[in-house]
Amino acid sequence: MIPRYARPEMTALWAPESKYAIWLEIETLAAEAMESLGQIPQGTSAAVREKAAFEVARIDEIEAEVKHDVIAFLTNVAEHVGEPARFLHLGMTSSDVLDTCLNVQLVRASDLLLAGLDRVLDALRTRALEHKFTPTIGRSHGIHAEPTTFGVKLAGFHAEFQRARARLIAAREEIATCALSGAVGTFANIDPRIEAHVAEKLGLAIEPVSTQVIPRDRHAMFFAVLGVIASSIERLAVEIRHLQRTEVLEAEEFFSKGQKGSSAMPHKRNPVLTENLTGLARLVRMAVVPAMENVALWHERDISHSSVERGIGPDSTIHLDFALHRLAGVMENLVIYPDALQANLDRLGGLHNSQRVLLALVNAGSSREDAYRLVQRNAMKTWAGEGPFIDHLCQDEEVTALLSEAALGDLFDLDYHFKRVDVIFERVFGAD
């Protein structure tokens, strides 16, 4: 992670101060539960809450000697708490603190990501409704196909990000578990009621079997969901990049006053934000395979996952958070050119009506094979630049033997293609 692609709200969550604050809360809540069960002296948790503190630099100093981050943390806390600190971490193992903390961080990261998704959804809804009936050519294989509307195009992305939101909610639930089960996860030296107390206070569920570590299939699912969301971001970014190409120029990123597009060519207005989003999507997806490889730990635990998660936890959530807000900004300010949309739609001289003509010929009594031959024969003349499609059809005696010129003209009504737009919008946005 580099500051260029980070928002302070998310980076603060992964700062050492935030991590150690969560560690301290876990240890204090555990002491609170032990005290309520009569396992440690009354007043211990109150003393911890009153006196406990830590210093990141001091923890680093101790860790340099002991080579163990949790021990270094506990040692530093004990320097502030004094004698009651001996009751901290009783029956617990490092993974109880590390894994529960990581899941707290991922849950909180999920909430920030959900806020970013909501901003994207709001922007897509607004722009889709704005251009609900703005005509544009639909493309398959990058080639003109049939008309659609710019609003329908954006509605499709809105539906996709609705699915992204649902997946992230499920991933948040998947990762929101707590484990305080001790060495190899048997609760031999810690009462399961302590885990239940900590889980409740942190808003987590109890991990059914933690084997000393929380199973990493949960994390694999979480990071896979982030990867899918990143791919959805990239799909929309690539669409905008294509639409901004000079030969198309149906839409483009907002170009602010004083902005420069190129150090060499003053005329340039480049899609730098959406190109950046494509790159950020690659960074987020980069975490998916390592997260899946973390699932297969040795026996009850090893720490091969640890170094991976120290990297992908912050990096993936920070990059995705930044990407979502960047995408929302792009969509909020996207410049859309209806005249260019219409001009490109008309560029092939009405060929986008070829299917309507095909179906009309079939309904008029032609075989599908003959109808296809007649339509394609005339379409290729227009494709070659020899005039409008309707003119060739009206001059083709085999065609006019089945369809009058008036009937052929009716087949070129653009509004025909938009008669189900309301249905699509109701499916995506609801009846209102």
Image (tube, rainbow, N blue to C red):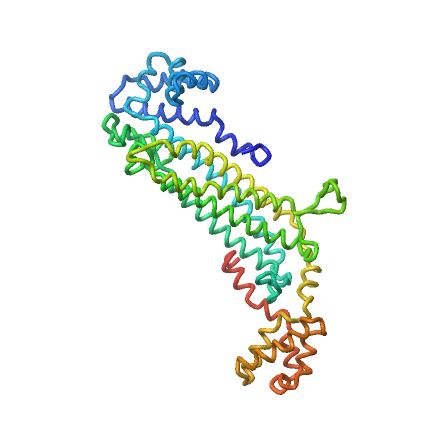
Give the residue drawn at x 46%, y 27%. 18
Residue 259 drawn at (x, y percent): 72, 41
Q: Quadrant of residue 217?
A: top left
Q: In this orientation, which residue lies closer to the viewer: 41 or 9?
A: 9
Q: Is residue 317 above or below residue 363?
A: above
- Is residue 265 toward the left or the right of residue 78 in the image? right
Give the residue drawn at x 58%, y 79%. 373
Q: Is residue 282 above or below residue 86?
A: below
Q: Quadrant of residue 210?
A: top left
User: So how many labels did they put on this image?
Assistant: 0
- Is residue 149 toward the left or the right of residue 96 in the image? right
- Is residue 75 toward the left or the right of residue 33 in the image? right
Give the residue drawn at x 64%, y 69%. 414
Name the residue at the right extreme: 266
Q: Is residue 101 above or below residue 403?
A: above
**Whether residue 22 can be seen here:** yes
